Image: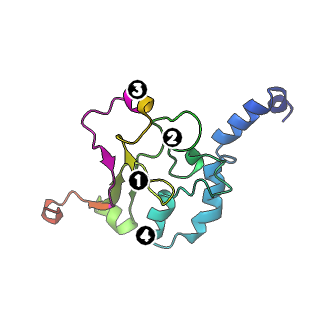
Amino acid sequence: AAALAARGPAWAAAAAALSYHRAPRAAIFRRDASGVRDLATLRALLRANRWPHDPLGGGSALGAICGRGDAGAGQPAAYGCIDTKVTRWAAALRREAQAVNGPTATPALPPFDWGRVNASLAHATPHEGQPRRFEYEFAWMTPDAARWER
């Protein structure tokens, strides 16, 4: 503790944000994980971003479980939660899962859209071939071609 204090408060804050036990995500998981009952509640937990209202998020859209570096104050960054995958035991045995592409969207965070992000972020981040707007729903992924959606 003394060595940490000697490095100063800025270093201590940065270290806490990256700590397995003290990071905002860790606190959010401790608070919310007991509410997971099925795939729907697991999906909701893993896509959660209650910025700017979550007191455990560290005041940042990146502090959420599904963080977004393009949102909030400060310098926007192409960084954060870019997809989510969930499954249950029986589905995992069949090599199946549900997945969604792109950053999370909430009432406070609209779907990520390259046409609406900070111009300097869009210019500095290669994104040719990507969709303009990431607004997707979870879909089942399976190796069983007979079950693929057409």
Relative image position of residue 10 (x, y in whole percent): 75, 31
Instruction: Give the alpha-carbon distance from disc 4 to disc 3, as whole Å.
Output: 36 Å
Is the residue 6 above or below the residue 15 in the image? above
For marks 4 and 2, the one nearer the N-term is 4
Nearest to viewer (mark 4 / mark 3): 3
Task: Decide whether residue 50 is among the magenta residues.
Answer: no
> Hey, what amino acid is under mark 1?
Thr
Q: Position of residue 78 (x, y in %)?
A: 45, 36
The reply to whether dot 4 and dot 3 touch (C-beta < 8 Å) is no
The nearer-to-camera label among 3 and 1 is 3
Residue pointed to by mark 3 = 124
Front-most of 80 and 141? 80
Mark 2 to mark 3 CA distance (whole Å): 14 Å
Q: Residue at x 27, y 32 (%)?
A: 128
Residue type, label 4 = Ala
Instruction: Inspect the image, locate mark 2, and give the three-letter code of the amino acid beneath it.
Output: Gly
Please state the total of marks drawn on the protein image.
4
Q: Are dots 1 and 4 in contact, CB under 8 Å?
A: no
* Dot 1 or dot 4, earlier in sequence: 4
**Disc 4 on helix, strand or loop?**
helix
